[in-house]
Amino acid sequence: MGSPKTQHGNYFEDFHLGQTIIHATPRTVTAGDVALYTALYGGRFALPSSDLFAQQMGLPQAPVESMLAFHIVFGKTVPDISLNAIANLGYANGRFGQPVYPGDTLSSTSEVLGLRQNRDGKTGVVYVRTIGVNQRNEMVVDYVRWVMVRKRDLNAPAPETVVPSLPDAVAAEDLLVPLGSAPGSYDTARAGGPHRWGDYAPGERIDHLDGITIEEADHMLATRLYQNTARVHFNQHVEQAGRFGRRIVYGGHIISMARALSFNGLANAQCILAINGGRHTNPSFAGDTIYAWSEVLERSALAGRDDVGALRLRTVATKDRPCHDFPYKDGEGNYDPAVVLDFDYTVLLPR
Amino acid sequence: MGSPKTQHGNYFEDFHLGQTIIHATPRTVTAGDVALYTALYGGRFALPSSDLFAQQMGLPQAPVESMLAFHIVFGKTVPDISLNAIANLGYANGRFGQPVYPGDTLSSTSEVLGLRQNRDGKTGVVYVRTIGVNQRNEMVVDYVRWVMVRKRDLNAPAPETVVPSLPDAVAAEDLLVPLGSAPGSYDTARAGGPHRWGDYAPGERIDHLDGITIEEADHMLATRLYQNTARVHFNQHVEQAGRFGRRIVYGGHIISMARALSFNGLANAQCILAINGGRHTNPSFAGDTIYAWSEVLERSALAGRDDVGALRLRTVATKDRPCHDFPYKDGEGNYDPAVVLDFDYTVLLPR
Amino acid sequence: MGSPKTQHGNYFEDFHLGQTIIHATPRTVTAGDVALYTALYGGRFALPSSDLFAQQMGLPQAPVESMLAFHIVFGKTVPDISLNAIANLGYANGRFGQPVYPGDTLSSTSEVLGLRQNRDGKTGVVYVRTIGVNQRNEMVVDYVRWVMVRKRDLNAPAPETVVPSLPDAVAAEDLLVPLGSAPGSYDTARAGGPHRWGDYAPGERIDHLDGITIEEADHMLATRLYQNTARVHFNQHVEQAGRFGRRIVYGGHIISMARALSFNGLANAQCILAINGGRHTNPSFAGDTIYAWSEVLERSALAGRDDVGALRLRTVATKDRPCHDFPYKDGEGNYDPAVVLDFDYTVLLPR
């Protein structure tokens, strides 16, 4: 029984410190992906929506949404890194590089940065740095994530524990600005809101107001679009007997929903420069209605640029709970049970 | 509580006669949008489906479906015009101009043509003319709609009542023909039906036969694709406590479904030239099966063209009711309860 | 009642031996179709996914998935061939020709090869050979199928019985290789698996492991994308009173799901060269979870090519039943009730 050609994914003992993993499948991103991304999330940021607007900001055409590039790069890592994962524990030190345009072909490669077997002897944490590159081998996105992975053989020896030290946030001087010098004709009316970089202050909180209900078809279309093969998203026949009795929504789908919702209040946050950290604090399911709010954590000038600046944000997504009172953590640091995402990232705005 | 940057949309007292509203977000239409539109409605008209066929009709490539252009232009107006609307009351005087091709960038601007506060003092009707233009500032679609909008402040004074006078239909001499002179090789076999302009007569009624069931994922994908943010389409968490207990399908989604169904009997009606009027007579919901029938209202020659002509049609859509007996209104002028759409528009056919 | 312009499809007595049927609607395939196909099935084969990979295999850019081309060609035949069909009985002698690239326009034409009235006098079997061509009139796919079609008039005389003789499989010498001479730099790591043509042996069986649950929205989006109008897929209002009480999934949707799942174990089977035969042994419905396994039937060299070879495969899809033990037929030749597809086809792999 069983066929030797069937791939079952890597288990904890299959990872080695310093190991490089070349992921399948190279993927040419197209205008079709962009349209689907719009249909899936309804994003309204002008830069990825309009070639004309992008040209006014100094780019040759509209780049794809930052998170679309991320999901495509991430999806490729799943069959090698997290097919046997129990949990996707976190992200850190994510930077976006070259903008991705329709026609670009993306590939992903990962390096194992750290390993730590858990005390139960059944699982371990794998830290990988993944880099996504385009057809010219230019970095388009680069990030660290760590996942808890099952052991195949409980008797396999524990590797030496190595936990990489990761920054709390990508430093402003390490951010890459995807725009040439902008010609200064930034159109806030067409962008959808008057507030520029200087209008936001650390500590400010913004309710993004609207809620969108998830359907099974939506999240599965999205996750397949990213060629992400994690089983828990797709197989109701297995999941009906699982922990939740149902398919779990890909965490990145929630990030994209929250990012699209954040247009209301952050219309000029045209692209993401960095993912400082992120946690999926609860699973989401079809039928859940996702809401979001954001807090401005930091405002940074960008070296040599007086036309654009960076804002570090925390965007929190909830399910079935509006965010007018900014639900987050209680006094003991425990998340409000409605919170599904705590996402710390840095966006670019015009000054 | 509440964040000053969150946009809540305009209320009745925020509109002023003659006011011009520049809508976010410019949108580059692509082959991706066209594919999604096909997947959402299954349209089979040859002109928007085939570059080859379009070239045989004198165009450089396949233009996008008329209603796709309309929905994109319309969607942009929602956050400014109808976010606080109770009802979308009607459309009139809609004309299509330049064909839209993949690569074109569309923007929308509206002008307030009329205002009428309702007697209850809580709501009012806003009439707007919206114009959608491409990147060369050429009109692609232009129409009037009126919506009933809530007042935020019930004590705000009523504006002077101005109700624009609107034509029953766009006059034949005002129709714009998107085709150059057609080379005369129109292929009815590939188009899918033998009936040309001259084969239709006013009063003729056509059952479009098939029915298509709406899914939540379908109508939400469509409405997000159009960057239409009307809340009633997306948020089950709120709508479960609302009037209908469920999400309402965007009315334009029904128009597109009816237009796609109308291929059976109107295969050569290659594009829409005008929207004379339209009413969503009942809400539609996921699970409803949409059927449609059409009546020919008028047949008009087009000045200087002996290759193509115009037909004014009424297409009626129903839910959960086949249309072999052409359900419409009873003797007292009340709509059959199964009717969800009464759409009066003008199409182009080869002679 | 009834409108003479409404098309009701052909009935058994409308078909004549040797008849040629030109199908509507020509269709330009685009990058949008490719993205949707990825979102619908999650395929990971490198050739259709990556322009870069395709160029390394000697093609100008990524061709679309073989089955996407097939579904588009097939969809056009439905309104003429199978609108009044009771069952799609089988496929044979299917060959893929010119690769299809975004921008190509496909048209379909069918010829009636055989007719056989059933003994009940109410139905008959129609055999058609369909050819799909691109805008240069080059064959892209060519196949025979046979369907059982209702008679409109039970008194219509039976035609002479003609049953075409069809090969069990397309012979290796008749296969068309869509690649120029490959430069030899085939990258198995990026392709997603180490196993080349020579690593597979007849009799070998491979479990594709994963299962994907079908949603109503998915299969209807797919089937509309292919402009396939078969009513049983779309109309719940009618189907709720039908044989199964629900919409039936287009059989081709299952083929595409099984092909996407087959990546796990057949990652280098970059395209399909032939469809030797196929049967939909049971209907599938939304909610079903589809699994698949494959058996290698034959391994053939290709004349004049030492870089690529052909494998003839049987891929079997099941619903709600994993395939680790390769469910197929019992001792009496009856299919396991979980089997929904028995598909015999030939794929291309690098040597």
Image: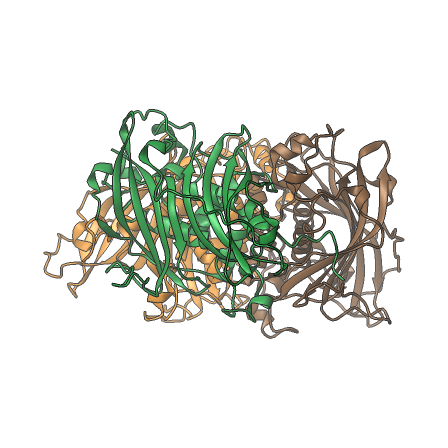
Chain colours: A green, B orange, C brown
Q: Relative to B345, is A217 on the left or the right? A: right
Q: Where is residue A250? Give x, y as percent.
A: 48, 55
Q: Where is residue C7? Give x, y as percent.
A: 63, 57
Above or below, B266 against B333 in this view is: above
What is the quadrant of residue A8 in the picture?
bottom right
* The N terminus of chain A, quarter of image: bottom right
Q: State the count of labels.
A: 0
Identify the residue at image location x=70%, y=59%: C292
Q: Is residue B311 visible?
A: no
Of residue B164 and residue B330, the one placed in the foreground of this image is: B164
* The C terminus of chain A, quarter of image: top left
Q: Where is residue A27? Give x, y as percent.
A: 57, 39
Of residue A222 and residue B305, the one placed in the foreground of this image is: A222
Q: Relative to A113, is C27 on the left or the right? A: right
Of residue C5 and residue A300, the one placed in the foreground of this image is: A300
What is the quadrant of residue A239 in the picture?
bottom right
Of residue B315 and residue B202, the one placed in the foreground of this image is: B315
Identify the residue at image location x=75%, y=56%: A3
Q: Relative to B264, is A64 on the left or the right? A: left
Above or below, A336 against A134 in this view is: below
What is the quadrant of residue A55 in the picture?
top left
Q: Where is residue B194? Give x, y as percent.
A: 63, 47
Q: Is residue A301 visible?
A: yes
